[in-house]
Image: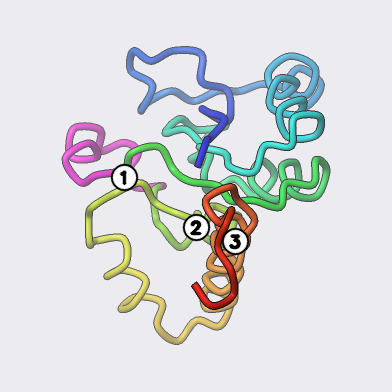
């Protein structure tokens, strides 16, 4: 899959895991979000990679306004959203983000996959949230988005129903 990245407000790669961006809605839409909107609406992008950074005090992947309201509801993204790399060693060095990087918050906001080899993220969902119906629904929706995107990608070209 090809991803447009890094959505959104990623102005620096130096110290990007600790950045918090504060801005008004008009500046967000007119300046920072416009290239992503064009990629999704006009370009038909199906996959988006979010950033480590925070919008205000919320990690971008757990920001429902960005992940669901804008990407899906305003722009019509029917693909899926993946995190930037999220391994344990990265967060050990940047403990400030760890507090807001709960996988459940991301799933509920509309982030669909974690670019990580760390088992911690799935272990947390299976233990801390095993009886949470909202999490179960969000996980089903995330699975649907990932499978829909793969099934409608060029990776499926030439395959038949018996393949």
**Element type where label 2 sits in the image:** helix
- Pointer 3: residues within 10 angstroms few (<14), some, or many (20+)? few
- Pointer 2: residues within 10 angstroms few (<14), some, or many (20+)? some
Query: Which residue matches tag 3?
Result: 151
- Is residue 34 on the magenta stretch? no
Residue at screen point 83% across, 43% down: 74
**Element type where label 3 sits in the image:** helix
- Is residue 91 on the magenta stretch? yes
Above-or-below relation of 152 to 29 = below
Marks 2 and 3: which is nearer the front?
3
Asked if the residue under mark 3 is in contact with the one under mark 2, i.e. CB atoms within 8 Å, the reply is: no
Q: Is residue 116 left or right of residue 113?
A: left
Observer-nearest of 27 and 46: 46
**Element type where label 1 sits in the image:** helix
Marks 3 and 1: which is nearer the front?
3
Residue 101 x %, y %: 39, 48
Residue at screen point 50% across, 42% down: 1
Which span is picked out in magenta?
86-100
User: Gap in Å between the C-alphas at discs 3 and 1?
Assistant: 33 Å
Above-or-below relation of 42 to 32 = below
Residue 62 x %, y %: 53, 49
Asked if the residue under mark 2 is in contact with the one under mark 1, i.e. CB atoms within 8 Å, the reply is: no
Query: Which residue matches tag 1?
Result: 98
Above-or-below relation of 9 to 58 = above
The image quadrant of residue 147 is bottom right
What secondary structure prevails in the magenta region?
Answer: helix
Residue 129 x %, y %: 41, 77
Mark drawn on residue 105: 2
User: Gap in Å between the C-alphas at discs 1 and 2?
Assistant: 12 Å
């Amino acid at each position: 899959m090809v991803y447009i990245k890094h959505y959104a407000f990623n102005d620096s790669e130096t110290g990007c895991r600790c950045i918090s961006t504060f801005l008004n809605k008009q500046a967000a839409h007119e300046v920072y979000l416009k290239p992503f909107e064009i990629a999704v609406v006009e370009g038909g992008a199906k996959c988006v990679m979010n950033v480590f950074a925070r919008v205000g005090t919320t990690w971008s992947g757990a920001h429902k306004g960005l992940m669901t309201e804008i990407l899906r509801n305003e722009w019509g993204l029917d693909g899926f959203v993946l995190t930037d790399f999220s391994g344990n060693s990265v967060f050990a060095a940047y403990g400030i983000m760890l507090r807001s990087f709960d996988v459940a918050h991301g799933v509920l906001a509309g982030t669909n996959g974690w670019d990580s080899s760390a088992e911690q993220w799935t272990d947390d969902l299976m233990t801390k949230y095993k009886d949470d119906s909202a999490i179960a629904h969000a996980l089903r929706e995330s699975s649907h988005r990932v499978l829909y995107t793969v099934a409608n990608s060029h990776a499926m070209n030439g395959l038949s129903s018996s393949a």
